[in-house]
Image (cartoon, coloured by chain):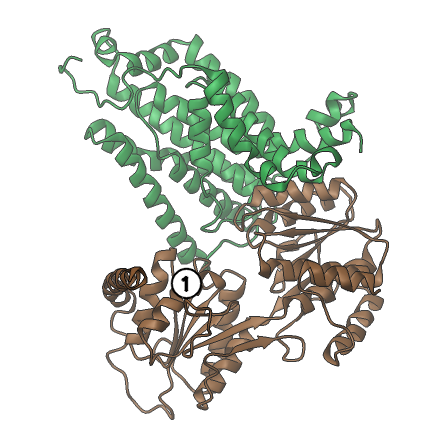
Amino acid sequence: MDLMQILELIIPAAIFSAAPLIFTALGGVFSERSGVVNIGLEGLMLMGAFTGAVFTVFGEQWGFGAASPWFSFIVAIIVGALFSLLHAVASISFRADQVVSGVALNFLAAGLAVFLVKKIFDAGQTPIIAERIDKSNVPFLSDIPIIGPLFFSHAYYTSYIAIALAFVVWYVIYKTPFGLRLRSVGEHPMAADTMGINVIKMRYIAVMLSGAFAGLGGAVYATSISGSFSHSTITGQGFMALAAMIFGKWHPLGALGAALFFGLAQSLSITGQQIPLLKDIPEVYLLIAPYVLTILALAGLVGRADAPKAIGQPYEKGKGR
Amino acid sequence: MKKKYGFLMSAVLAAGTLLSGCGSADNNEGTQNEGGGEGNKNDFKVAMVTDVGGVDDKSFNQSAWEGLQKFGKDNNLEEGKDYKYVQSTAASDYQPNLSGLIRDGYDLVYGIGFLMQQDIQTVAQQKKDAQLALVDSVAVNENGEPLENVASITFKEHQGSFLVGLIAGMQTKSNKVGFVGGVTSELIKKFENGFKAGVKTVNPDAEIYVQYAEDFASSEKGQAIANTMYGKGADVIYHAAGATGNGVFTEAKNRAKNGEEVWVIGVDRDQHEEGMPENVTLTSMVKRVDTAVYEVSKQTMEGNFPGGKVTEFGLEEDGVGIAETKDNVSEDALKKVDEYKEKIKNGEVEVPKTDEEYETYVSSL
């Protein structure tokens, strides 16, 4: 096996496993940039995966054919946004502890999704979906030598959407008035309020956006990787996304890089065991590699992580801070 | 002295979990036990506790429940009263669920899955007169001796895996096959070595890739491993990896859609449905948990509770085998399967379970 073949195995695998994390991490960026901690990403992702699987199945029944997963994405975005309202109401309007409210969201999602699956399908998991998001070669681009096979073959379209979306989010947060307001609300809500920005409204929008993105991330996971939804579909991916966001210093492109890095480390650790050169390394080292690499990168390369200043603090009008 | 102290402590802890169990079992069951006692021919009561997979996990919890349902129907028992299941949503539910059922007067209580081993052992030692059964593992006390009031049910997975190995060896075109394991353990090794032996028996030149995901619930790892194996030219992958195996199916279906001819061999039950609509399931290695549950329940009802013993279900007892759906298996391969079934049953072929046995087996070919 030559190097090219090895890379052809590792890189596409890294990109596909990163996609759900990218979506969810971008959602986290919105919420936390506005000053609301969102531990609930896991739960939101879980609801997204649930909705993704369920509505793909329904879509198939309703005759949407190959469009079923895309239809389910739209529903998952809506469900994610609505579900995140619980977090928004508790932590913004009622000024509850944001971490506690996020954790509550995770518990609620886990119970609710499994309960609903049981009610709808009378089974512990959804049926296997027939219309998945499939791997395919991007026309034209996959014919480019070297780059084509590495980046544009055997890939999910959703991965490219995720990457493109990271740039869109970056543009929105750093280059538009909306983004400036969002950031100001997270850095110094008092000052923002004085300038006539509706802090509460901004935060609501941000949390709902994070729900929408995480819902999409979950739906992408269900329709492209697991192919069904059960209690073991989302186990920690939301927290990985949270880590990617912090690793990426609350920056959309940083989060994108971190998610891709996680994907690469994971794919290296799995594929490595089948590659001639790395095969001789004891398995356990390859298995722990993603975590060791992450710690090394966090400690050595990334430097100080600057969280938004007002993160975790509920805003109360007229109470200066 | 120190040991005594430890025992005391574990007793206190166990009492704690037991007490907490009182509440939860009641919640689960509500009124079901109150109306009892109206004229069954026999008042045998049997129940099972699922592991976290749930009763419709499309795997052995479901299969066990099917066996129990059949047993119940055949003996005119009433569902929900004389036979029933209790689901566990977390590992911490196992003990309360088990003791709850014992307290409710069930004559035989099953713990499904080796995940429940510890809890069965604890409960069995607290409730000496209860009759318990453990599927997929062997219950022992702290000295490693079998517990008298637990019937341990295990399967000869290596035999079933050997059969699907034969099929894989016959039907691979690239002469490369793969095995994806869940977590490295004695149990999963049985699958691996049986499978490898089967492949080598009919196809000595075949190359076999083996990899463990070290996780039973990670579809993306399963998919990445399958991606690598198929990428290296394997065309049949046998998975013994629970939900991680879903990823193997996803990858195979993706490749099948793009025109590649790749196959997956399912595990525990007929996984034909998982391979649809692209139809990538070659066959499945089936563990007849239903047969085992049915048999042990029957024995117990007749007063022959196999407590303290390990009841092993192999080919002979119809406890393992290949799946009902045989559409994708060639005639020749089926013939080979039948041929070796006989050979295994009459002892002509001894299927290896461990790595050492496998080495000996292969060198004897």
- The chain ID associated with circle 1 is B
Q: Residue at x 28, y 30 (%)?
A: A88
Which chain comes out brown in the rendered image? B
The amino acid type, in three-letter code, at marker 1 is Gln
Q: Position of residue B260 (x, y in %)?
A: 78, 44
Q: Position of residue B130 (x, y in %)?
A: 35, 79
Quadrant housing the N terminus of chain B: bottom left
Which chain comes out green in the rendered image? A
Q: Position of residue A301 (x, y in %)?
A: 50, 16
Q: Decide if residue A22 is on the left or right side of residue B188.
A: left
Quadrant housing the C terminus of chain B: bottom right
The answer to whether one can see residue A139 in this image is no
**Front-lying residue, B331 or A11:** A11
The answer to whether one can see residue B156 in this image is yes
Q: Decide if residue B192 is on the left or right side of residue A78.
A: right
Residue underneath mark 1: B118
Q: Residue at x 49, y 85 (%)?
A: B298
